[in-house]
Image (cartoon, helix red, strand yellow):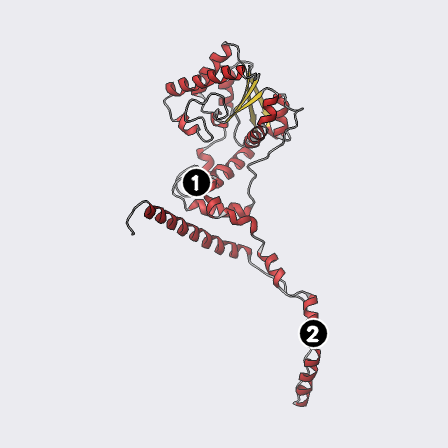
Amino acid sequence: MKLIFHIGAGKTGTSSIQATLKANAPVLQARGVLYLGLMFEHSPARLFEWQRFGGQDEFLALPQAEAEAQFNRVLQATLRRGREAGVHSMIWSSESFFDRFDAVLGPLQRACEQGLDLAVLAYVRAHETWARSAYIQWGLKHKTYPGRLRSFGEWVAHRKPLFAPTLARYDAAFPGRLTVRNFDAAGDVVDDFCEFAGLADLPLERVHENHTPDDTELFLRALFNDRQDSDALPMVFDKAVGRLLPQAASPTAFLQGLYPHAADIEQVARHAHADRQAIDALLVQQGQPPLQIGAITPKQPRIDDGRLLGALARLCIANARRLDALEAEDQRLRSGGEPL
């Protein structure tokens, strides 16, 4: 049995690799390859509650001895049932274990002693670009800390990008089994991963996830998360505000669609020709100059986007918070609470 353990690091295309593997699970299984997911949620041996998407925190909160024992049970049962099902290769992709590996190294080492062909794969990128991308992801989009938003300088002071100690630990635990790839030089990281895993010839549908939001969306997310006292998952914003973003045209484009065009103004002039002649006769009779017809340039919108965005964003966030409070009160009343 071969096991590819893809440990990340985060912000090196891991979400796209995982989404591609999940979307193509039937194609992989036909080749004898089983994608285990992030927390062995796709393993044929489902033994513990943490074996689900998002279960890493539950697993990592276990005492180390208990976590190691549980992981060993899952690993051994997965390998055994995989062999029985004709699987020859498995892929485990989870960046959660890039630097929190204490509970999994021992069981993996023992499995290697029993004949497991283990390959550990890590992608690394330039520290500066990693820090910038990671800050947008975990400092702004998904706020992973309590309190107000931290600036990049404040955030990176608590999360300095250091990869070598982790790579050295894996290399020491599994001599000759660690492969380190340069994310910046890899091109399409999904293609690079498939090449490494021997899947390049399969007709796999590529899935690319975790696109960086544009500055408009990022501003709204930052303003929203800055008002959250605890950490804030991206779906909290998506539920309250984000679902409206794809439908929003720019203010300039919206007004341009409403303002009169040159053809519209010419049509008004044609319809008013007789009326203008009558008015001009009255004006001349009373010693006034006739109405002047000059070149009429269609009005162009001039919107202060910064001012508008700031005002609307604050209004939007305020209303979202009010709605959230109303929904919480509604839920409390439905559960039998007394009106406030």
Residue 191's spot in the image, x, y percent? 64, 28
Type of the residue with mark 1: Ala
Quadrant position of the N terminus in the picture? top right
N-term mark: 1 or 2: 1
Residue 248's spot in the image, x, y percent? 56, 52
Q: Residue 12, can we see it?
A: no
Picture residue at 61% right of the left edge, 57% below the top = 253
For residue 190, the mark is none
Picture residue at 50% right of the left edge, 30% below the top = 161
Observer-nearest of 308 and 194: 194
Q: Is residue 229 left or right of residue 111?
A: left
Type of the residue with mark 2: Ala
Observer-nearest of 35 and 141: 35
Q: Which residue, given by chain and number where applicable, does mark 1 sit on? A: 232
Q: Residues within 10 Å of mark 1 (few under 14, many from 20)?
A: many
Residue 326's spot in the image, x, y percent? 38, 51
For residue 269, the mark is 2
Image quadrant in which you'd find residue 280: bottom right
Residue closest to the far left: 338
Q: Residue 248, can we see it?
A: yes
Relative to residue 272, is residue 105 depicted above or below?
Answer: above
Relative to residue 280, is residue 136 depicted above or below?
Answer: above
